[in-house]
Image (cartoon, helix red, strand yellow):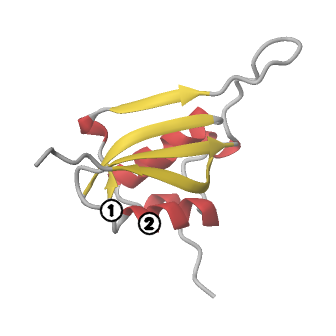
Amino acid sequence: MQAPVKYSSLSAPDQWWIRQLQQLGFGRISFIVQGGSAHPAAGYRVVRTVKLRAGGEDVRPMPQVLRADFILRNEQLVLLENLRVIPDGTRVTVKVAVGLPTNAFEVEQEHQAA
């Protein structure tokens, strides 16, 4: 069994990335991969999914957002592991539900005409 991985043990780009997912809650986030991590300096796009309900949107942050440190969930670890093998400059779009990545993500690669 693998030892738990804490948020504080992540690199700064990975910490940034995990916080973006948590703050988004529901939707998608698209970013460029550089060095096996999300590269915020290259810009990123967020599409927030708003659930319609009486009384307006539920805007409470995920509970982990309020914590300085916490143990990462398996969904977060699997995504970070998968980002490590994606070539630099590749755009990735991740769907997010309840502040966690879903079980699939899109990898967008540009090809120049010959």
5 lies left or right of 57: left
Q: What is the x, y in percent for residue 61?
A: 66, 33
Residue sitting nearer the eye, 48 or 111: 111
Disc 1: CA contacts within 10 A as few (<14), some (14-19) or many (>=20) = some
**Residue 26 in which image quadrant:** top right
Residue at position x 53%, y 28% from top? 47
Residue sitting nearer the eye, 89 or 80: 89
- From this viewpoint, which residue is outermost toward the right? 54
What amino acid is labelled 1 in the image? Ile
Give the distance between the C-alpha atoms of the residues marked 1 and 2, in whole angstroms: 7 Å
Q: What is the x, y in percent for residue 71?
A: 61, 63
Q: What is the x, y in percent for residue 84?
A: 35, 66
Residue sitting nearer the eye, 67 or 110: 110
Disc 2: CA contacts within 10 A as few (<14), some (14-19) or many (>=20) = few
82 lies left or right of 59: left
The residue identified by callout 2 is 82
The residue identified by callout 1 is 86
Residue at position x 48%, y 38% from top? 29
12 lies left or right of 106: left
Residue sitting nearer the eye, 11 or 36: 36
Residue 6 visible in the current orientation: no
Residue at position x 52%, y 52% from top? 105
Given contact means CB atoms under 8 Å apart, are the residues at marks 1 and 2 in contact? yes
Residue 42 visible in the current orientation: yes
63 lies left or right of 30: right
